[in-house]
């Protein structure tokens, strides 16, 4: 049964200097992809040639105050050989963009949306790079290290509906600020002698 | 915003793609085939399901594009319960984050506590004494039974079988009573710490677990008899929401949802942690990947959990009363709080307590990922540490988040009434999905 380290070396044979030497910590093997533009290529190879068929997790990290600022971490797992492998790549703040791995694992679609939403890292070729946890139009990236824990005030989104509701203007609909239904509805029942 | 014009299209005779009376199960294709759904011609209508819809189990919003009653496109919208747990974690010590893990999958807080503590312990390179590991295994399996009981009850209720809910909730109450005796809290257990747990098993607690095991099996059988061969239940769930094994893996599904699709991946077997490699249990795997299979997988998992609970209760070193004072926590005072009587009488322990409370455990620099098999799937924590008492980055790999990412792919082609069945069978928790 091959180990994570052997898979890492196999990938390294294929990509040579584009990958760093594998590091090991607590039994986990990490490979760093030197050029972020090649990450999808490496992932494709890892999936097809090495059998890493499950993208367990995708994490964005903000190395605030260091260059390159962003690190994206891919946690891979292969069901057949039961090995984990971690791929890492870093990209500078000026670029803040790297290729998507959505075409390798479709599960990455939401993971990458989250990384974009939380940190502002963009993924080139992503089919649907919208915010996912925060709302559309939110102006900040809250997981950045320069975003305060207490948050920043921002506009909350408008109500979802802009067109009139189907019954608006009907006889039984109360409009905010308008006259109440007792005045409006002439057939309203009142107690005797209280007209 | 249905106008009269829209409503006319609900009449299937008005739609050239589907002749009246042919809207059978088979005409929608198993597994939600988006292409065949697109061929149905007619004016589309947008239906907003959630975020406060009873069958969305919390605050999931799904925007559905409909052709008549058939879904042609689905766009899940999440984040209504986003609290920024990962941001919060970066700003506190490791132990301070334990109560936040209660609130991830709030139907299985004990299992979350264990998964989180084990992730930090992996970073620190710690291993728990045997009794502590047994206690944690019991906690995980109790949480699994409890979460599946709720998942089953709510799923059955979503498709109209109200009775099951009453049975399973009665049983779940007993798990909460056990949790209360063990931790002092019913829901927000916060039981574990880095290097151990807050207290040993209370006297007589294991007998309570054994009694619960006997009783819950009766309830599972009752639910089984109410549902498994129930014609209505089968019609509502079979061949509905079919997910192929390839798709399930591709979207990163884990837990019962993945196994129902025929993929045999259970973290407890694949990369065993705690005592799962020494205990005897089986992992049920489905064959079709529809709602019915997901239901069957959960039913069997509960039975297997009961098996595990019984084995743990019999084998735990020290037994129920722990007369010989078997350790349950790591003995290192720099990791786990020393006993209070020593803190008050001895200098070294006093210093340890002071450092632990003010600075937190001193974790080495490095990064680890630890995934545990939680009721909903693989709950993972990726921790990047640069040394010291707080994580530099803590990412929560929430199983519900990954499981829901397949919705946009799997809903189209189904009818609106199937959405409740599919969502129910997914058994997700938004507290964990949105974090």
Image (cartoon, coloured by chain):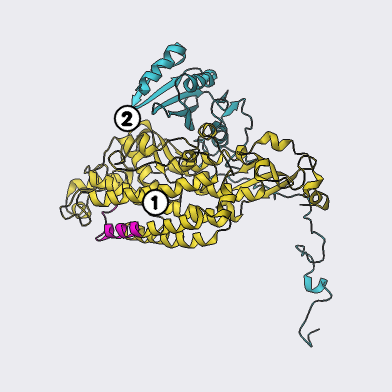
**Is B212 a magenta residue?**
yes
Q: Colour of chain A?
A: cyan
Q: Residue at x 42, y 14 (%)?
A: A12
Residue A185, located in which quarter of the rendered image? Answer: bottom right
Left or right: A108 with respect to B26? left
Q: Where residue B283 sits in the image (x, y, percent)?
A: 39, 41
- Which label number is shown at residue B25? none
Picture layout, residue B362 above or below residue B193: above
**Is B213 a magenta residue?**
yes
Residue A14 appears in the picture as rendered = yes
Number of marks in the rendered image: 2
Measured in 3D between alpha carbons, the distance from the residue under mark 2 to the one under mark 1, in whole angstroms, is 28 Å
- Which label number is shown at residue B143? 1
Specify the segment rendered in magenta.
B197-214
Q: Where residue B424 sits in the image (x, y, percent)?
A: 55, 50
Q: Residue at x 29, y 51 (%)?
A: B310
- Which label number is shown at residue A26? 2
Residue A109, located in which quarter of the rendered image? Answer: top right
Residue B395 vs residue A47, the one in the foreground: A47
Q: Residue at x 27, y 49 (%)?
A: B312
Q: Secondary structure at mark 2?
A: loop
Q: Secondary structure at mark 1?
A: helix
Which chain is yellow in the rendering? Answer: B
Q: Residue at x 41, y 44 (%)?
A: B374
Left or right: B144 with respect to A133? left
Residue B354 appears in the picture as rendered = no
């Amino acid at each position: 049964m091959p180990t994570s380290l052997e898979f890492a070396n196999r990938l390294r044979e294929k990509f040579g200097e584009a990958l760093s030497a594998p590091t090991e910590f607590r039994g986990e093997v990490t490979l760093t992809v030197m050029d972020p533009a090649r990450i999808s290529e490496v992932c494709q190879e890892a999936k097809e040639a090495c059998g890493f068929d499950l993208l367990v997790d995708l994490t964005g990290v903000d190395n605030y105050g260091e260059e390159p600022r962003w690190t994206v971490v891919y946690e891979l797992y292969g069901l057949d050989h039961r090995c984990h492998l971690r791929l890492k790549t870093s990209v500078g703040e000026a670029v803040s963009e790297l290729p998507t791995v959505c075409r390798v694992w479709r599960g990455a679609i939401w993971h990458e949306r989250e990384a974009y939403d939380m940190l502002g890292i963009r993924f080139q070729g992503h089919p649907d790079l919208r915010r996912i946890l925060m709302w559309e139009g939110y102006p900040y990236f809250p997981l950045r290290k320069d975003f305060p824990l207490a948050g920043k005030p921002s506009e909350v989104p408008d109500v979802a509906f802009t067109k009139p509701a189907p019954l608006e203007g009907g006889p039984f609909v109360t409009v905010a600020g308008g006259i109440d239904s007792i005045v409006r509805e002439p057939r309203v029942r009142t107690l005797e002698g209280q007209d | 915003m249905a106008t009269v014009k829209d409503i006319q299209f609900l009449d299937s005779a008005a739609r050239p793609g589907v002749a009246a009376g042919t809207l059978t199960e088979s005409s929608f294709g198993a597994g939600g085939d988006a292409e065949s759904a697109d061929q149905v011609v007619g004016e589309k209508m947008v239906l907003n399901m959630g975020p406060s819809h009873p069958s969305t189990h919390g605050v999931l919003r799904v925007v559905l594009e409909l052709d008549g009653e058939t879904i042609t496109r689905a766009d899940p919208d999440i984040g209504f319960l986003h609290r920024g747990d990962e941001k919060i974690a970066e700003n506190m010590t490791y132990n301070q984050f334990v109560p936040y893990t209660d609130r991830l999958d709030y139907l299985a807080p004990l299992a979350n506590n264990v998964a989180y503590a084990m992730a930090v312990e992996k970073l620190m390179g710690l291993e728990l004494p045997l009794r502590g590991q047994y206690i944690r295994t019991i906690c995980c399996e109790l949480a699994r039974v409890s979460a599946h009981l709720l998942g089953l009850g709510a799923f059955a209720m979503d498709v109209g079988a109200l009775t099951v809910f009453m049975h399973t909730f009665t049983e779940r109450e007993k798990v909460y009573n056990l949790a209360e005796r063990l931790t002092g809290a019913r829901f927000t257990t916060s039981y574990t710490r880095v290097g151990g747990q807050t207290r040993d098993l209370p006297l007589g607690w294991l007998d309570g677990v054994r009694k619960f095991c006997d009783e819950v099996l009766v309830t599972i059988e009752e639910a089984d008899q109410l549902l498994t061969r129930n014609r209505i239940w089968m019609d509502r769930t079979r061949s509905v929401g079919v997910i192929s094994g390839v798709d399930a893996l591709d979207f990163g599904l884990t837990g019962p949802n993945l196994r129902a699709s025929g993929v045999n991946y259970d973290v407890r077997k694949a990369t065993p942690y705690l005592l799962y490699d020494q205990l005897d249990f089986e992992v049920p795997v489905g064959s079709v990947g529809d709602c019915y299979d997901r239901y069957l997988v959960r039913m069997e998992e509960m039975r297997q959990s009961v098996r595990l609970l019984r084995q743990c209760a019999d084998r735990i070193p020290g037994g129920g009363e722990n007369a010989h004072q078997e350790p349950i926590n790591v003995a290192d005072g720099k990791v786990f709080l020393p006993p209070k009587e020593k803190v008050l009488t001895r200098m070294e322990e006093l210093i340890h307590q002071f450092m632990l409370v003010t600075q937190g455990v001193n974790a080495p620099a490095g990064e680890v990922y630890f995934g545990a098999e939680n009721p909903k799937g693989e709950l993972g924590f990726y921790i990047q540490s640069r040394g010291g008492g707080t994580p530099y980055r803590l990412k929560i790999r929430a199983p519900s988040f990954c499981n829901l990412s397949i919705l946009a792919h799997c809903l189209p082609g189904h009818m609106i009434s199937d959405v409740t069945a599919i969502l129910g069978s997914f058994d997700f928790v938004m507290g964990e999905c949105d974090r």
